[in-house]
Amino acid sequence: QVQLVESGGGLVQAGGSLRLSCAASARTFSVYAMGWFRQAPGKDREFVAHMYWSGGRTYYAESVKGRFTISRDNAKNTVYLQMNSLKPEDTAVYYCAARVRVALGTSKDDYDYWGQGTQVTVSS
């Protein structure tokens, strides 16, 4: 089992920045990749970014490319999502996820473990 705990959400004005954190339990040796998803009210959960735990390759949704950065701190078993130039349409609950298998990584069905989510609200 991998337990994930997100933090760092909040209210920010458009153009501002936030950094989300996702702390994973110690059993991360089985983790193949970590991802961030978001879900706005009335919408499906959508892919934001993911990173391979070994090697650190990253992938981003087109809507956040150039504004968001996913990174990790191996010593702390923590993954971050730095969000800059935030827009009102970025408002959503953001979820951290982990997968222990090979997959494309852009679908929520690719992931095995999820955090509880953290609210990000961007005001105009």
Image (tube, helix red, strand yellow):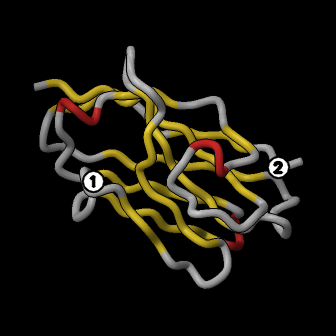
Question: Residue 35's mark?
Answer: none
* Dot 1 amino acid type: Val
Question: Residue 64's mark?
Answer: 1
Q: Quadrant of residue 62?
A: bottom left
* Dot 2 amino acid type: Val
Q: Most extreme residue toward the top, as rendered?
A: 42
- Residues at discs 1 and 2 in contact (Cβ within 8 Å): no
The residue at the point 17 percent across, 24 percent down is: 123
Residue 60 in percent (x, y) is at: 37, 61
Q: Where 1 sits versus 69, above or below? A: above
Question: Residue 2's mark?
Answer: 2
The residue at the point 49 percent across, 43 percent down is: 37
Q: Where 29 sits versus 10, above or below? A: below
Q: Does dot 2 land on a helix, a strand or a loop?
A: loop
Residue 110 in percent (x, y) is at: 65, 51
Q: Quadrant of the C terminus?
A: top left
Q: Does dot 1 land on a helix, a strand or a loop?
A: loop
Which label's residue is closer to the chain start, 1 or 2?
Answer: 2
